[in-house]
Image: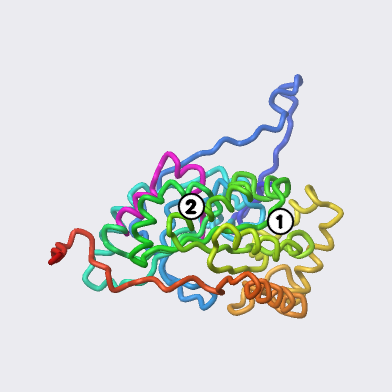
Amino acid sequence: MNPEGRFERGTREAFDDDWFPDGREGEAAKPGTVIAIERAKRVISRNDSPDLGFSLSVNPYRGCAHGCSYCYARPSHAYLGLSPGIDFETRLFAKPEAAQLLREELARPGYRCEPINIGSNTDGYQPIEREHRITRSVLEVLREASHPVTIVTKSALVERDLDLLAPMARDGLATVVVSVTTLDPRLSARMEPRASAPARRLEAIRRLAAAGVPVGVNVAPVIPFLTDHEIEAILAEAARAGAGWAGWSLLRLPWEVKDIFRAWLEHHVPLKAAHVMARVNEMRGGRDNDPRFGTRMTGEGLLARLVRRRVAVARGRLGLAGSPPALACDLFRPPGEARQPSLF
């Protein structure tokens, strides 16, 4: 599905004009991935949302090849004149100068250190990171500056950077959250087709924990009538793998995402589609989406309260905290600044 963005005035529709009667042109083809270079002026984004545990973030990429049908970030592609549908997962933008821009921003006299998040909008460890290595270059700058960082990802590729994350973690400078939506590999393959498989994400939690990196699990999004029955099982498996804390968030369907996700439901789970959306509406005050701070992440009503209670009980039983450990900000030194040599 590749609907026009909400700012577009016209619409486009595929049409078979019979120029290729043997079917070659009419056959459905998987669109190839196109990667463009974005020349950003700044790389640190700031937010004042009370629903987020951070104010600063860095997004090395725009768009995300993971292709999660429910992704709340899809509408951001509309600002580029592109579709939040297939375009979001195949027309990607890389920021190769991100590390240098970050270095410049951290070196500014008025910069005030607080944890920077990677993965708030699109996953910094999506498949193109293997080649472009922009997330790694950002981590290298943060490590040089002894700057705290939090990472949210659905990709086991985060293990590649353990050589950076482990020493940062020893200094209280790094935490990682691995998002797990379902433990069912078949459902995951349809709903988040190019993200790491559930078992592989749990293994990433295990390896991060073994390396001494504080790691948590995010059960997100919780999709009523489709994945909500797995909450306790996901938390138990994550705790067994070494997760130290757990968070969760309810399915969010802003702007174009509601139509994309409805289409996905009708195609993949048609017998459950109406039930899923009825539950969503019930937890969103009768709407598909609730953008209000305070309720947009967790919903409202009896069912939302029940989910919160289930998570709280499971955390208590499994010994999982409700939030990550605080990170150190007092070690920060602007990149390139001479360090006082140790007396020892």
Residue 295 belongs to magenta span:
no
Across and down, in percent, residue 4 comes to 63, 51
Q: Which residues are magenta?
A: 121-142
Q: Residue at x 39, y 69 (%)?
A: 115
> Is 330 placed above or below 203 here?
below
Residue of label 2: 62
Judged left or right of residue 266, residue 199 is left
Across and down, in percent, residue 163 comes to 36, 50
Q: Residue at x 51, y 53 (%)?
A: 123
Across and down, in percent, residue 180 comes to 62, 57
Residue 132 belongs to magenta span:
yes
For this rendering, which residue is in front, 201 or 112?
201
**Element at badge 1?**
helix
Q: Which numbered disc, 1 or 2, marks the residue that appears first in the sequence? A: 2
Residue of label 1: 261
For this rendering, which residue is in front, 157 or 254?
157
Q: Tell me if mark 1 has few (under 14), some (14-19) or many (20+) residues whose alpha carbon lies within 10 angstroms of its own.
A: many
For this rendering, which residue is in front, 240 or 201?
240
| Amino acid at the residue labelled 2 | Arg
> Is 283 placed above or below 38 here?
below
Across and down, in percent, residue 118 comes to 44, 59
Q: Residue at x 30, y 56 (%)?
A: 141
Q: Residue furthest front?
A: 344
| Amino acid at the residue labelled 1 | Phe
Q: Tell me if mark 2 has few (under 14), some (14-19) or many (20+) residues whose alpha carbon lies within 10 angstroms of its own.
A: many
